[in-house]
Image (cartoon, rainbow, N blue to C red):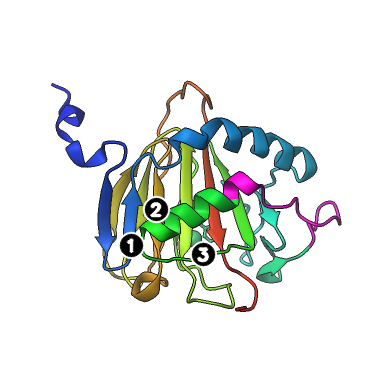
Amino acid sequence: MNLDLFAPDASPGGVEAIGPQSFVLRGLALPCVPQLLAALRGIEAAAPFRHLVTPGGFSMSVATTNCGTLGWTSDRRGYRYTPHDPDTGRAWPALPAVFLALAAEAAAQAGFAGFAPDACLVNRYRPGTKLSLHQDKDEQDYSAPIVSVSLGLPAVFQFGGLARADRPARVPLQHGDVVVWGGVDRLRFHGVLPLKQGRHALLGEERINFTFRKAGPPP
Ligand code: MD6
Ligand code: FE
């Protein structure tokens, strides 16, 4: 029996609250997938994916690049946002219009009108890749939400509380789903469980995640 048939909440267009100011917007990105993937090809041509090294000296299993005026990077000296790609010395590629429009629409649907991200972290997962539980704390302005767009292989998003010890909820994410968290939920711990083997019709053995932030100073 396929129990997924009885998961009406996960239908496209559905909105699920996972916190007081946190929502999963099912399938919101589906109409713009072709434009998102076309823009991604341009971004990775200018700023190739790389495996960042954590301050602790470990190479991250997820491969990362960025677009926007600021990009999130990590090395032995710490986590930070930079205006230039440390691998190429060039400015990060600009945020494509379709990215800005999708991020603003998702934020607005979650109650955060006027979201204008300046940073988009792009993560590429392959089967086995995970992202450990963490808080997004490297941004200057916590009043803006985080908007996270999932494409390709499904994943299980962990959404915890404000303390590391709070047991995280497991939120299954599919191609096209968008998660928004902000306000009182802005600093909640979150992560991604190891990706399961699989093949996606458009992206093969990959999951792509776009995470939009307002990283620089408030306006
Ligand atoms: C994701 N990424 O890849 C979510 N946060 O689905 C993150 O939550 C994240 O990759 C802070 C720094 C790097 C990240
Ligand atoms: Fe994060």
N-term-proximal mark, 1 vs 3: 1
User: Which residues are drawn in magenta?
Assistant: 84-99
Along the horizontal axis of the image, is 32 left or right of 95?
left
Amino acid beneath label 1:
Ser
Can residue 101 be seen at all in this image of the molecule? yes
Pointer 2: what residue? 179
Q: Quadrant of residue 213?
A: bottom right
Amino acid beneath label 3:
Phe
Q: CA distance from mark 1 to mark 3?
A: 15 Å
- Examine the structure image and report whether residue 135 is included in the region drawn in magenta: no
**Foreground: disc 2 or disc 3:** 3
Locate the C terminus and report the quarter of the image it occupies.
bottom right
Q: Residue at x 47, y 57 (%)?
A: 147
Locate the N terminus and report the quarter of the image it occupies.
top left
Which of 102 and 186 lies nearest the eye of the viewer? 102
Q: How packed is label 1: few (under 14 Cα within 10 Å), some, or many (20 or more)?
A: many
Pointer 3: what residue? 115
Residue 50 x, y percent position in the rendering: 69, 46
